[in-house]
Image (tube, helix red, strand yellow):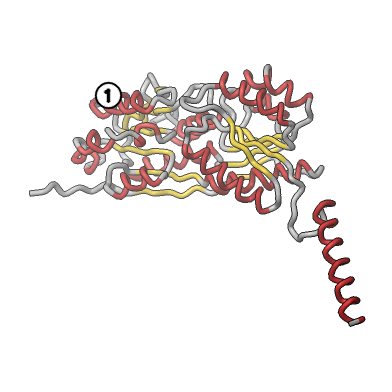
């Protein structure tokens, strides 16, 4: 009987200590601090940013922290993004990861409040332009200039004889897209003596994140006999229902490399189009890695640590000659 009473006392004491440990935050292994971190997307409607968020959220929850997604729904716009940053500051976040739409506008508006609140910041996917990079501790994502160079390299491999190059883009203020365009231009070296490559004068052609407009622009370029290469530094036209029926009409010219189609992005929809030989090049970005690293770096900063100025995530290259045999 005495042994039973002693055992019951010990069990009761153990239970009290466990409860006390959980309340004080040191009882269960892996228990986090309940911190709040934020992913600021260009748009919450963009599936790629949802992928970043889901990966970051999974990582945060594994350590007892929280992750929220903001940025506004529908078409991306820098004023909406700026307002979303202002609004989320009311929740007193422990860190913020942002894909930048317009560096100067953010710097002159919401990021004055971010800095005053001393909220740790990293960028992902799209960095601040160089003059505003003091606003963040580090960048996580694709080496966007190298992505642009690789789009150009694959084109040069598929069509060594040269030709006229058209560049399609989203918004003209997006840092990551402009870095990709710069990479394309550097690799082609259009102004080099004896260059076989020329740049279409109206490049880059912006669709301003309007997918249907991107498809209309693509059709005009496919119909332009002077254009040999179409490089899109994003996925816009390929994410429309009209892409496949449109491009199928140009299969013979694609097979002969009279028209080369190269796209940034390798979303499952884009990979299906590639598998059908409806693009020559797709270069995939690792958005899940961006999300995991966004949480890891914000957590380190919230703990008073430091992070690398740049952390590049891997790319995956899909490239083919699009040989086509018409059905008899």
User: Measuring 74% from the left and 22% from the top, which residue is drawn there?
Assistant: 113
Estimate the x, y position of residue 3 in percent, counting from the top left: 89, 82
104 or 281: nearer the viewer: 104
Where in the figure is residue 153, as x and y percent of width and height? 42, 42
128 shown above or below 148: above
Q: How many marks?
A: 1
Q: Is residue 5 above or below residue 167?
A: below
Q: Secondary structure at mark 1?
A: helix
Q: Quadrant of the N terminus?
A: bottom right
Q: Is residue 153 left or right of residue 244?
A: right
Whether residue 176 sits left or right of residue 136 in the image: it is left
Q: Within 10 angstroms of label 1, few (less than 14), some, or many (20 or more) residues?
A: few
Q: Is residue 263 left or right of residue 20?
A: left
Nearer to us in this view, 300 or 226? 300
At 29% from the left edge and 32% from the top edge, which residue is drawn?
A: 228
- The residue that label 1 is drawn on is 220
Q: Residue visible at 24% across and 40% down?
A: 254
Residue 25: % across, % down: 81, 52
Observer-nearest of 62 and 184? 62
The percent coordinates of residue 168 (x first, y second) are: 39, 28
């Amino acid at each position: 009987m005495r042994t039973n009473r002693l055992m019951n006392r010990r069990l009761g004491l153990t239970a009290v200590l466990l409860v006390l440990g959980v309340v004080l935050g040191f009882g269960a292994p892996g228990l986090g601090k309940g911190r709040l971190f934020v992913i600021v997307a260009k748009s919450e409607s963009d599936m790629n940013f949802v992928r970043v968020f889901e990966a970051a959220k999974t990582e945060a929850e594994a350590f007892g922290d929280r992750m929220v997604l903001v940025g506004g729904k529908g078409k991306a716009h820098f004023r909406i993004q700026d307002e979303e940053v202002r609004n989320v500051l009311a929740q007193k976040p422990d860190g913020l990861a942002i894909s930048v739409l317009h560096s100067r506008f953010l710097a002159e508006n919401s990021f004055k409040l971010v800095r005053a609140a001393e909220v740790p910041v990293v960028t992902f996917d799209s960095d601040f332009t160089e003059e505003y990079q003091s606003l963040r501790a580090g960048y996580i994502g694709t080496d966007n200039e190298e992505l642009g160079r690789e789009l150009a390299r694959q084109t040069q491999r598929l069509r060594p004889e040269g030709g006229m190059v058209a560049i399609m883009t989203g918004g003209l203020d997006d840092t990551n897209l402009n870095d990709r365009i710069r990479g394309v231009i550097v690799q082609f070296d259009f102004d080099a003596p004896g260059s076989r490559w020329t740049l279409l004068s109206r490049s880059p052609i912006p669709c301003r994140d309007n997918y249907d407009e991107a498809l209309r622009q693509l059709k005009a370029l496919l119909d332009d006999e002077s254009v040999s290469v179409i490089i899109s530094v994003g996925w816009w036209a390929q994410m429309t229902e009209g892409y496949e029926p449109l491009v199928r009409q140009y299969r013979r010219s694609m097979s002969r490399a009279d028209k080369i189609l190269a796209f940034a992005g390798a979303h499952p929809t884009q990979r299906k189009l590639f598998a059908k030989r409806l693009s020559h090049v797709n270069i995939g970005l690792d958005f899940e890695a961006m999300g995991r690293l966004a949480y890891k770096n914000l957590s380190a900063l919230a703990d008073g640590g430091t992070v690398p100025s740049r952390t590049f995530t891997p790319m995956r290259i899909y490239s083919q000659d699009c040989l086509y045999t018409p059905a008899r």
